Image (cartoon, rainbow, N blue to C red):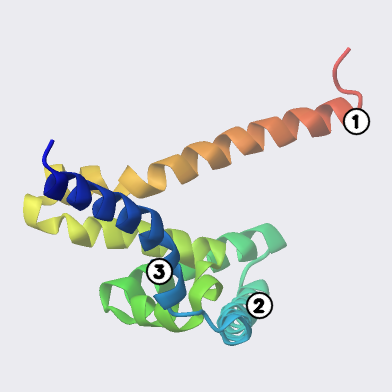
Amino acid sequence: MKPEAEEKIRVLEEASRSYPKLARSKAPRPNTVQGMSRAFLLGGTLSLIGQFVFDLFRVLEPTEGEAAAATLAAFILLGAGLTALGVYDRLAEWGGAGAAVPITGFANTVVAAALDFRREGWILGMASKMFVIAGPVIVFGAVAGVVVGLIRAAALGLFP
């Protein structure tokens, strides 16, 4: 091999070894305190609104279970509506993990996926693609529920 080709290979190998360190040194540092504060504020605000809505439904519904179900439905509608209007994405950008309050975050995931694939049509686009991201969450939730139920049943001595 020619000396200039060997030199080029050596320079490229050296650059490939030093690049990850250089990239890490140039990457912006996240402001952890600010991120945690914003997540706390957004998640707390959503939770506070949820408690208010639950208290409202508790007055309107005959049982606590029905009030909880109505609250969940209202928050699914809220998350879906804010996603469709483009507001939820801005909230999530500002509040980070605070926007992942389970039920509104789940509604956001389903609606965002549906909106991304709407150009492909109602059936092959929106209807089939909206559970691409949310599907594993549903499966994991169902499996976790069964496992926790079995553990609880075993703890109560319901198995012979």
Residue 73 shows up from this direction: no
72 sits left or right of 115 in the view: right
The amino acid pointed to by label 2 is Gln
Where residue 98 sits in the image (x, y, percent)? Answer: 55, 74
Q: Is residue 108 above or below residue 3?
A: below
The residue lying at 60 percent from left, 80 percent from top is 32
Residue most extreme to the top: 160
Badge 1 or badge 2: first in the primary sequence: 2
Residue most extreme to the front: 3
Rounded to the nearest angstrom, the CA distance separating label 2 from label 3 is: 48 Å
The amino acid pointed to by label 3 is Leu
Q: Crowdedness of circle 1 by 10 Å Cα count: few (<14), some, many (20+)?
A: few
119 sits left or right of 112 in the view: left
Residue 82 shows up from this direction: yes
9 sits left or right of 147 in the view: left
Rounded to the nearest angstrom, the CA distance separating label 1 from label 2 is: 31 Å
Q: Please say if the residues under marks 1 and 2 sit with CB atoms less than 8 Å apart.
A: no
SS of the residue under disc 2: helix
The amino acid pointed to by label 1 is Leu
Q: Is residue 10 above or below residue 98?
A: above
Q: Which mark is residue 156?
A: 1
Residue carrying label 3 = 22
Judge by depth and name the residue closer to the eye, 75 or 105: 105
Where residue 92 sits in the image (x, y, percent)? Answer: 43, 76
Where residue 83 sits in the image (x, y, percent)? Answer: 32, 72
Residue carrying label 2 = 51
Badge 3 or badge 1: first in the primary sequence: 3
Rounded to the nearest angstrom, the CA distance separating label 3 from label 1 is: 57 Å
SS of the residue under disc 1: loop
